[in-house]
Image: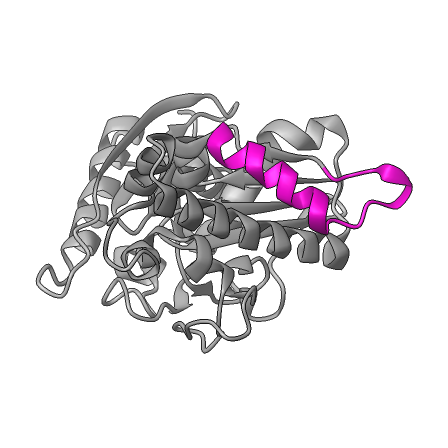
Amino acid sequence: METHYLGIDIGGTRIKLVVLNGAGDLLEQNDYPTHDSEFSGLAWKEKIIETIAQKTQEFAGGNLTKLRCGISAPGLADSSNSKILHMPERLQGIEGLDWSKELNRDIVVLNDGHSACLAEYESFYKSRGVQNMLVLTLGTGVGGGVIINGKLYQGAMQRAGHFGHTVVDHSGVKTMTNMVGSLEYAVGNFSIAERTNGKYQSVKELVKAHVEGHVLASFWWLSSIQKLATGLASLINSFSPELIVLGGGISSGAGNLLFKPLQEFMGLYEWSPDGKSIPIVEANYGGYAGAIGAALFVKSHKTTI
């Protein structure tokens, strides 16, 4: 029986899953609400356990070794990629949860930004000879990942790629990591109501109002893009990547309403020796990058059970 690979991505609002075969072909993709709130308890966890059991039966006839599972989640993974060690404020019960021990089967865990980065690199850029690239995911928050010399770089404490927790405004609001004026606060969907004085409840609403010509909406939207540009220019100076990929729901939803003004702002801030700028492109996978990356990661990961 062929081994299949299940990737599950735990997002702020949706849990997404994919199943790949040994050749990496996509056999299934699906999603359902995360139901992460103070009232829902561990409902998200119970649903994931139920899903893993269901897909194991469906794709492997119940054979645990023939459906290998990777989980992509926010927070810091441990050094063995077996659990999330730190996840402040959200997903009650995920910190310290060793999925392999919980389910008595081999399951690997990867930070969601790292997972999205791996998916984009392995599927689209590795074959082109790219060796160094950055991925930023713009959604509920801002995550990301780093490819250095053709390999995913997780760093000490698996903290690499948390670009959302870099500073773009030294006098700005402090968020959960004690960083003031973070890129995540400037761009992420979670802070939109606060950033717009309660006028808009989502980036989607803000962008729609911008398109309709509402002056304040345009100011708030373009201000967030300006701060994104300063952050990206700083990352280019720090990592010297060959390209930057922007993924997540904000990137895919806004499209050129994001990328066009971003390029203009980059012209103000990017250091471009010999006139060479670093390409900034939209992610290919959209919302399923985390799940696909988790499946690809477990595909190359050695079993521990």
Quarter of the image where the C terminus is located: bottom left
- The residue under the point 40% across, 55% down is 141
Residue 226 lies, with reference to residue 125, above or below; the image says below
Q: Is the magenta stretch mostly helix, strand or loop?
A: helix
**124 vs 226, nearest the viewer:** 226
From this viewpoint, which residue is outermost toward the bottom? 178
Residue 144 appears left or right of 4: right
- The residue under the point 46% across, 37% down is 251
Where's residue 90, x and y in %? Answer: 27, 64
From this viewpoint, which residue is outermost toward the right? 274
- The residue under the point 13% across, 63% down is 41
Where's residue 145, x and y in %? Answer: 57, 51
**282 vs 54, nearest the viewer:** 282
- The residue under the point 74% across, 35% down is 130
Where's residue 147, x and y in %? Answer: 67, 48
Residue 250 appears left or right of 44: right
Residue 114 appears left or right of 19: right
**Quadrant of residue 277 within the rendered picture:** top right
Quarter of the image where the N terminus is located: top left
Residue 26 lies, with reference to residue 35, above or below; the image says above
Magenta stretch: includes residue 259: yes
Magenta stretch: includes residue 183: no
Residue 230 lies, with reference to residue 133, above or below; the image says below
Residue 297 appears left or right of 195: right
Residue 230 lies, with reference to residue 300, above or below; the image says below
**103 vs 265, nearest the viewer:** 265
Q: Is residue 88 visible?
A: yes
Q: Is residue 17 visible?
A: no
* Residue range corresponding to the magenta coloring: 256-278
Q: How many labels were placed on the picture? A: 0
Where's residue 128, x and y in %? Answer: 73, 27
**Quadrant of residue 69 within the rendered picture:** top left
